[in-house]
Image (cartoon, helix red, strand yellow):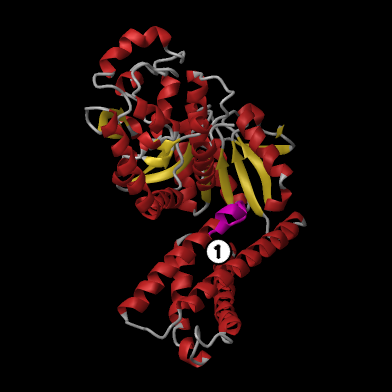
Amino acid sequence: MLREYTIVFRRVMTGIDLAVMAGSFFLAYTILWQRQDIVPLSLQSYAVFLPILLVMWGFLLTHLGMYESFRVRPLSEVIDILFKASMYGLLCFGGLVYLLRVEYLPRYLIIYTVIIADLLTALEKITLSGVFRIMRRRGFNPRQILIIGSGPRARFFIQQVTRHRELGLRVIGVVDDDPELNGTRVEGFPVLGTLNDMAALLRQQVVDDVVIVVPRSWLTKIEGVVRLCELEGVRVHVAVDYFNLRFAKAQQSEWLGFPLLSFTMTPDRLWDLLLKRALDIAVIIATAPLALLAAGWCCFLIRRDGPGPLVFRQMRSGINGRKFMMYKFRTMVPGAHEQQEALRPQNELNGPAFKMTDDPRLTAAGKILRRWSLDELPQLWNVLKGDMSLAGPRPALPDEVERYDNWQRRRLSMRPGLTSLWQIRPLKQPADFYEWMRMDLEYIDTWSLALDLKILLKSLVVIVIGRW
């Protein structure tokens, strides 16, 4: 019965979402119909495209997982699915219109439709989620779960389930491998038996889900339980927090049909990372005329300052230690790198990196270029090639990386950037290598597109008016 209820529920939700999209189409036309330059034809002329839009919208929402159970799904994930469906939908529908050479369908009509559908669908999901939580708190549609395990992690999980009644999860009991626990209670719930009693319990009790929260040493013991649940058709969940990791995030993945438990130490939101890359390219294209003009001025300054190459090339370590050739406008005298060891005692950083404020190797033109960060302009080519990004940890020298401590090497797990959190710090903060590393790791752990935009804007302020 529960399976039939779930199928009906998903079909109803799909129908509501399609009705919202259809209503958004008519609402968008109503908003735009007064603009004859945008929608010169009648509603009937455009309505022939509505079935295609509905099929595409329904397919995308289903494919992206909108109609999977959202009993424990955060609303942020629902919004993310809507955003992806909108982007994919606009691309697919726009491509279809282009291939069919439909010239009379206004792009604004489709854009307005998708935006309105996003807003109304998000409001619908938020409302339904709130209503369902209230209903579940009052005992409607509970999912009965059986807990396997009685250790500290299992007890903590039971406490969380008990605390969040709005999720509609009802613990019916606990199963443990120790027969002496039979008849006792764990966090107020009865111990119903041992692992050997699982077959009988699944027949005697109404069990919607089995949740296994056991130590790593039990992995061989629970294999039989998982197989039994598979045969019985009962959904089983295995807690995977086997390792006390501080920042790694666990996720299920599959390689060549082989299920894996993956721990990611860097942002893995593919869509956001693609947008980050698109942002890099868009900014470079938008600023290309100004960048070329500034580059010409830089070349004039360097050439006027004396002989030597205009561009300095140096091998750097990129993502996960990949080597790449980084480019900068030359700001030092020829052979400056060979002089660095002699200046090592004057290094202002307390780690493997080298930094010196009044570096005697700087040329007159180099001081001007560094003052306005113009020496970094050639790295836009590195960004365009994909070696770097506009924002991210600064690329390090390979010999510096070799002297990193283990925790410092994690800064290599994200694509290096033209600017970083470290470079927009207030000038009053001391130049400390370990603080530099900490800020790079903070960037990786808290990364978002909004953070990238913040860094880029603050970097622009630093360049224009100096550090504050």
Residue furthest front as drawn: 304
Q: Quadrant of the N terminus?
A: bottom right
Q: Nearer the viewer, residue 401 or 260?
A: 401
User: Mark 1 belongs to which amino acid?
Assistant: Arg
Label 1, secondary structure: give it. helix
Q: Is residue 151 shown to the viewer in this render?
A: no
Q: Look at 57% across and 67% down and name the residue there.
A: 118
Q: Is residue 329 positioned above or below 142 on the image?
A: above
Q: Is residue 184 positioned above or below 6 on the image?
A: above
Percent x, y for residue 147? 61, 40
Percent x, y for residue 6? 57, 65
Q: Look at 30% across and 77% down and name the residue there.
A: 99
Q: Which residue is mark 1?
A: 3
Q: In screen coordinates, is 131 left or right of 91? A: right
Q: Nearer the viewer, residue 437 or 18?
A: 437
Q: In screen coordinates, is 289 left or right of 150? A: left
Q: In screen coordinates, is 18 left or right of 335? A: right
Q: Look at 42% across and 9% down and name the residue there.
A: 346
Q: Nearer the viewer, residue 312 or 107?
A: 312
Residues shaded magenta = 67-79
